[in-house]
Amino acid sequence: MKLQQLRYIVAMVRHDLNVSQTAEALFTSQPGVSKQIRALEDELGVELFNRRGKQIVSLTDAGERVVELASDVLQGVESIRTVGRELANPNVGELAIATTHTQARYVLPPVIAQFREAYPHVSLQLHQGTPSQIAEMLAGGDVDFAISTEGQAHFEDMALLPCYRWSRAVLVPDGHPLHRLHRLDGITVEALAQYPLVSYTFGVDAQSTLGKAFAERGLKPHIALSASDVEVIRTYVKLGLGVGVVARLAVDDSPRDGLVALDASAVFPPSTTHIVLPRGAALRGYSYDFIQTFAAHLDRDCVDAALSGGQPTIDVDALPLR
């Protein structure tokens, strides 16, 4: 049995059993993938995949169990390599983080500047995406950890560490009826329901904070457009497609480009941003430092407790509100 064979079957699952995509991701050929999978099945004496002709269509029961164990083995191998790199060169290496556009643009710059000053020989990579894309990158081993807010359901079997809370703002043209209402009695969900909304791609489903706020009042938001970037949302609000709902930390109080940001903390409860880590993973020393720079209460003991399967006691209501 070879590690290469284990990588192939795990990669097959991560690429929806598509041999072509798996081969491309592993920089090999389709026949090479198929040959290694067959060799492993022959050695184990069981079929790992159900086939329709030459096409792989699903995992067998045995395949599900073997893939689960193979994932653990591969993570263990990577942890051993991480320990070796840490002992050999503690201040040299790479750190890959998956996060959203809002975090990358509005929250992380001062953290990264401080980290780069402390670790000039660490190559830092930021991968941006929606929560589902971030979860896929984390599960695939493409990043060391993730920073995410909504979509916790995407991070099953991962360690989630709360970092800070953030509130929302409503973007409208200056003089909009909601602007006048905000000055008088304040915005309500019922008032927002009268207008098309432009908001985050990951924030418009029924399980999001926005979706739940509407559902609790028996209402359904009319989503005119969703996007991942605040500036894109701002552009389409200016074009008149709808009212924007964005993170308060991504806008300021002064009008810009004819738009004003109205505080919506009384309309929507705050959301919590989390650091997300694969349980059992080994982290470099500088990774711990980055995490604590991002969220001061997440020290090494706290992170290690989460990695080992524990749940550190963190009072979310006491976290900073941005």
Image: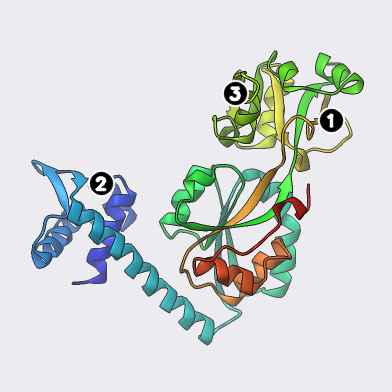
Name the side, left or right, on which 120 lies relative to 61.
right
Above or below — where is 270 with respect to 25? Answer: above
Q: Residue at x 65, y 50 (%)?
A: 273
> Which residue is at 60% across, 24% downward?
215
Q: Which residue is mark 3?
A: 225
- Which residue in the protein does label 1 denote? 256
Residue 48: % across, % down: 17, 55
Position of residue 100 relative to residue 179, above or below, is below
In this view, the mark in front (2 or 1): 2
Which dot marks residue 17? Answer: 2
Q: Earlier in the sequence, mark 2 or mark 1?
A: 2
Compared across the picture, whether 146 is left or right of 191 comes to left
In-front residue for pair 158/291:
158
Q: Earlier in the sequence, mark 2 or mark 3?
A: 2
Where's residue 131, x and y in %?
53, 44
> In the image as oriented, which residue stretches furthest toward the right?
184
Q: Is residue 147 left or right of residue 244?
A: left
Given the image, on which type of amino acid does mark 1 rest? Answer: Arg
Point out the residue furthest to the bottom here.
88
Q: What amino acid type should be assigned to the residue bearing mark 3?
A: Leu
Q: Identify residue type, mark 2.
A: Leu
C-alpha span from label 2 to label 1 = 48 Å
Whether 118 is drawn above or below 24: the answer is below
